Amino acid sequence: MFDFITTDSFDIEKTNQYKLSIQVSLDGFSFLSVQPSENKIVACKNTPLNISNEKLIARHLKEWLETEDFLRNPFKEVSVFIFSEKFTIIPNEFFSDEYSGDLASVLFEQNTDYTLIENKVESINAHLHFPVLTKIFEVLQLYFTNAQYFHPLTKLLQIPLFINKRNRSVIITFKNYFYLIVLRNNHLLLANSFQISHHNDLVYNIINTFQQLETARSETDLFIADVFTDNTEIIRLLKPYFENIMPLKTDELVVNSEITTNRFLLCITQN
């Protein structure tokens, strides 16, 4: 069993004062609960899994939710972050409510098995669309009728990071793929996902992408986060290619950030 961690200030009778964030991915599930008035984590749990494909997520998710009694309580706010490889970002000047569904269907080759979710990304004046298997969405709605659903990049793109260089890049790694964001002078150049079977694939795709974008790695602050495991190995592999590389820091977001090892969920939860 994976530990359900609570702090001294945790009170099961006061969950209606807590914000709850849930992470759903092929690498597993997690939740994080924050007392916003005190800016403290009050409860969290990580459940790493190795789910072989997207169509099996709903079954594993239902089993997980059935075992987590804590999640049956009422919460002040519930945010669900669904980690999907497929997404598209549409600038506001090209966005239309009338045609957004048709455009997304063409981009994703979407069918009736999927529910399209739309997020606004105010920091870049755009909308992010991503498809979620309807079975996953239905399982979540059974437990969280008023939840808000986000792609993690929606929140990540809005996190203000102090940088020394004119370029900023963020890498989020999983077992079989990773997200890469590249910005120049706070203007988004790229946000994409890349499949990987080995760490060398990650290094190749990152170096190749920077070359295609004609973006100097020496003028880039690179932030790295791993959702469930330590990112030390990724940092070691990329250090020969970037002068400024560091973990995605979240310590300033809550007063007791040491409670959780899932720094990325903490980061997007508090943004």
Image: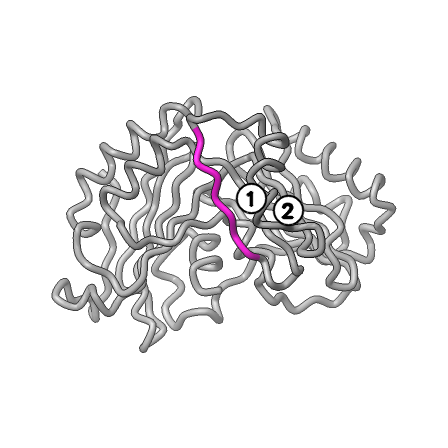
- Image quadrant holding the N terminus, namely top left
Task: Tell me the distance, in whole angstroms, between the alpha carbons under discs 2 and 1.
Answer: 6 Å
Mark 1 neighbour density, 10 Å: few (under 14) some (14–19) many (20 or more) = many
In reply to whether residue 150 is colored magenta, the answer given is: no
Q: Nearer the viewer, residue 154 or 95?
A: 95
Picture residue at 29% right of the left edge, 27% below the top = 59
Q: Return the residue found at the far front.
A: 98
Circle on res. 51 = none
| Amino acid bearing label 2 | Ile
Mark 2 neighbour density, 10 Å: few (under 14) some (14–19) many (20 or more) = many
Q: Name the residue under label 1.
A: 129
User: Horizontal placement of 236 versus 65: left or right?
Assistant: right
User: Horizontal placement of 183 versus 103: left or right?
Assistant: right
Image quadrant in which you'd find residue 76: bottom left
Residue 260 image position (x, y, % from top left): 37, 56
Picture residue at 70% right of the left edge, 50% below the top = 94
Picture residue at 77% right of the left edge, 39% below the top = 209
Q: Name the residue under label 2.
A: 89
Q: In this view, does 153 lie above or below 15?
A: above
* Range of residues picked out in magenta: 114-120
Residue 173 image position (x, y, % from top left): 56, 40
User: Horizontal placement of 84 versus 12: left or right?
Assistant: right
Q: Is the magenta stretch mostly helix, strand or loop?
A: strand
Picture residue at 50% right of the left edge, 63% below the top = 250
Q: Which of marks 2 and 1 is nearer the N terminus?
A: 2
Residue 270 image position (x, y, % from top left): 44, 64
| Amino acid bearing label 1 | His
